[in-house]
Image: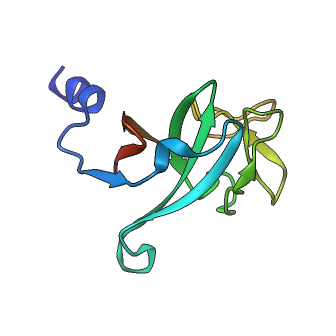
Amino acid sequence: MAGFLKRLFGGGKQGVTVPGGATIEEGTARGVDIGDPLAGGTRVILAKVDGEVFAVDSRCPHAGGQIQTGPLEKDRFVVCPLHRYFFDPRTGHAEGVACAPVKRYRVVTRGDDVEVFV
């Protein structure tokens, strides 16, 4: 039970403020480095769907390709260009293919900024 509650409420994960993260345009994705990805940091993709900002890992779980930034496919899917896998940033699930979900991060919107918990 304690493990479930930790996962549900962030479990000690560190929140990192992304200035202006909530101002990305509807139906687009933007890459953000949380720390230095070459020194243990994380690159995440922020995507705005239905007025809400979501964060997913920048690496595709299938073959490690970089999730694209820019316009979302069908205004709601982030895309891995290696095999054109579509992932719903709201759930992390792949659309129409048997693939593990992309890792998602909790996001809290604070005005024009977002806090991403990695």
Q: Position of residue 47 (x, y in %)?
A: 60, 42
State the residue at coordinates (15%, 25%). Answer: 2
Q: Is residue 116 above or below residue 58?
A: above
Q: Residue at x 68, y 52 (%)?
A: 62
Q: Does residue 101 appear in this view?
A: no
- Is 91 in front, or is 22? 22
Give the quadrant of residue 49: top right
Q: Is residue 58 left or right of residue 36?
A: right
**Measured from the top left, where is residue 91 in percent x and y?**
57, 28
Relative placement, left or right, of 10 versus 91 is left
Image-based side of 26 in relation to 107, left or right: right
Which residue is located at x 35 percent, y 70 percent? 35
Q: Position of residue 99 (x, y in %)?
A: 69, 40
* Quadrant occupied by the N terminus: top left
Residue 113 appearing in the image: yes
**Residue in the image at 29% along x and 26% along y:** 8
* Up-down relation of residue 95 to residue 84 (above or below): above
